[in-house]
Amino acid sequence: MLTSKQRAFLRGMANGIDAIFQVGKNGVTPELRDTVHNALEARELVKISVLDNNMLGAREAAEMLASRTGAEVVQVIGNKFVLYRPAKKPVIELPPVKK
């Protein structure tokens, strides 16, 4: 579970990246899930856009993909959303959690 500071840190990082995948009219397919899974392992942070002809909203598509890939939804804005999942060898160093 991400803290608000970690989520804000990831939102700032995601601001400069482009969407690398699109959820089309077929919705969240197994092929899309597999490619997002591989991208999360390589990048840890991915931005995905949802096309207008999709039956799902961005929030629903984000939550569905997050649950199927083991990722966390960082943010949903308009028709785009950002997912984060730490890789086996993490590249992104998140701010520490204060107790």
Image (cartoon, rainbow, N blue to C red):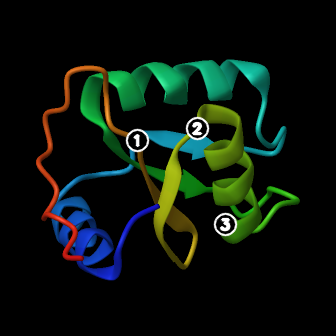
Q: Dot 1, how many residues are within 10 Å of its Cα: few (below 14), some (14-19), or many (20+)?
A: many
Residue behind mark 3: 58
Question: Which mark identifies residue 85?
Answer: 1
**Element assignment for label 1:** loop
Task: Name the residue furthest right.
Answer: 55
Residue type at tag 3: Ala
Quadrant in the rendering for residue 10: bottom left
**Element assignment for label 2:** loop
Real-space CA distance between mark 3 and mark 1, rounded to the nearest whole angstrom: 18 Å
**Element assignment for label 3:** helix
**Relative image position of residue 63 (x, y in whole percent):** 69, 57
Viewer-closest of 38 and 78: 38
Residue type at tag 2: Gly
Q: Please report whichever mark, 2 or 1, sits nearer to the chain's N-terminal start.
A: 2
Real-space CA distance between mark 2 and mark 1, rounded to the nearest whole angstrom: 7 Å
Q: Are marks 2 and 1 in contact (CB under 8 Å)?
A: yes
As drawn, 58 above or below 44: below
Residue behind mark 2: 70
As drawn, 82 above or below 11: above
As drawn, 86 above or below 61: above
Question: Which residue does the image show at 65% across and 27% down from the upper left?
Answer: 32
Q: Please report whichever mark, 3 or 1, sits nearer to the chain's N-terminal start.
A: 3
**Relative image position of residue 83 (x, y in whole percent):** 45, 52
Give the left or right position of residue 90, taking residue 83 as reference: left
